[in-house]
Amino acid sequence: MSVAGDILGPEYVVKVYKPDSSVWAFLVIDNTALGPGKGGIRMTSTVTEDEVARLARVMTFKTAIAGIPFGGAKAGICVDPSSLTGRERRAVIEWFARMVKPLSPRRYIAGPDINTGEREMLWYVTANGSWRSATGKPVDYCMKLYGGHQRCGIPHEFGSTGFGVAESVRLALALSGLDAKTATAAVDGFGNVGTFVCKYLDAMGVRIVAVSDSKGVVMNDSGLPYKDLMKVKKKTGSVVNYEGGAVIERAVLFELPVDVLIPAAMPDVIHGENVDRVGAKIVVEGANIPMKDEFEERLHRRGVLVIPDVVANAGGVISSYAEYRGYNPKKMLTLVERKVTGNVRFVVTESDATGEKPRDVAVKMAIERIRKKGVPNG
Ligand code: NAD
């Protein structure tokens, strides 16, 4: 499928191929009006050019809404990472870094996404040759720059995105007149974002009744303690092996009558078949593009509050900005909290006043900021 263009972009759609392992990869740099395109590298067997383009547009809006000097981009490497040895995985990342080097870091700055983390970012910057070419680098990656300044990594493994999503949940509950201490939640995904969402929600007193990962869904109405889930995940590789819960069908997670549903894994998990059966009062999008606009509209008309990805999961890209500026992790988390909750409050308040859904309010603000900067440089 070819990617459709509009007034904002995309500026570049790059497709590269690694013949010795039959791996395709995509880089879409959507819009650089506000700064170099920022976006993670996703490594899945299902990623497509179209998915990467949709994600790159999300990044264009997310960085503009967060008010940070980055544009929007995304990369996808189409391979099942579990089929690769460690050495092969490294070779694929290094290959991709070299292939996109003419654009990175000037027009594209990489970051972690599904199945990539601090280790991959270290491989990426090493192959690229510039510390600026990726964020989400390991904390012990430190570079002395000219003038004696030091730049160190802030890995997404610090949980900036999950922290911001959990803070969005806290505020969305409060703005809906619900108390976190008596609220219930279901979380789809138990990776970087999902684990930290569970950690922070658990600490707030939210009762997490269902959690999923790639192997399935575990449920317990009385609650699933974060620490126990984490132990089981580390020991056995999946939350489904948690003995304090029952394994349920994947589809049921999206229909549970919880206060908050948090998609924190794959795209398009809410779709035409299940949107009318979503049982939550609030959906906070930890994942990117967990549903298409038309389904968000349907939920909005039904009175379900949806905090969109471009607002709720901006913690990762705000952390990237903090890393770029050389902030320490504490200052980074303060910035995430301030920016994310400020924007949640703004979109919910405006949505209540105008009747528009929160995403429309957020996107309008993003487009205004991008237009003020004019058409990206050629
Ligand atoms: P990750 O690779 O760390 O974790 C992905 C999780 O999804 C794993 O628990 C995996 O088991 C699970 N999973 C895979 N297939 C699944 C399925 N079919 N059903 C349920 N779970 C499944 O990835 P991540 O970094 O946590 O990213 C998750 C989502 O959050 C993505 O949409 C990503 O774009 C978005 N996001 C991530 C960040 C970040 O900082 N990592 C920032 C913003 C947005």
Image: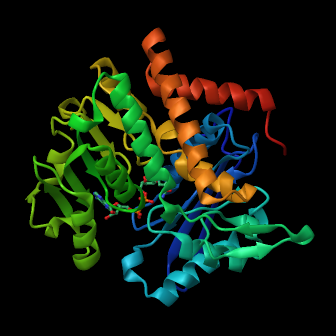
Assign the C terminus to one quadrant of the image.
Answer: top right
Query: Is residue 30 positioned above or below 233 on the image?
Result: above
Q: Which residue is outermost to the right?
A: 147
Is residue 160 something one can see in this rendering? yes
Q: Is residue 197 left or right of residue 159?
A: left
Q: Is residue 242 left or right of residue 66?
A: left
Q: Quadrant of ligand 1?
A: bottom left
Of residues 157 and 249, the one drawn nearer to the viewer in this rendering = 157
- Residue 74 place in picture, x, y as percent: 58, 55
- Residue 141 place in picture, x, y as percent: 66, 76
**What residue is at 47 percent from the left and 58 percent from the top?**
159
Q: Which residue is outermost to the top?
A: 353
Query: Is residue 60 positioned above or below 329 on the image?
Result: above
**What residue is at 19 percent from the left and 61 percent from the top?**
216
* Residue 80 location, quadrant: bottom left
Count of numbered labels shown in the rendering:
0
Of residues 220 and 308, the one drawn nearer to the viewer in this rendering = 220
Query: Is residue 340 positioned above or below 220 on the image?
Result: above
* Residue 103 location, quadrant: bottom right
- Residue 78 place in picture, x, y as percent: 47, 68
- Residue 92 place in picture, x, y as percent: 56, 79
Q: Is residue 143 left or right of residue 9?
A: right
Is residue 19 something one can see in this rendering? no
Of residues 32 and 272, the one drawn nearer to the viewer in this rendering = 32
**What residue is at 28 percent from the left and 27 percent from the top?**
178
**What residue is at 53 percent from the left and 53 percent from the top?**
52
Q: Is residue 275 left or right of residue 318?
A: left
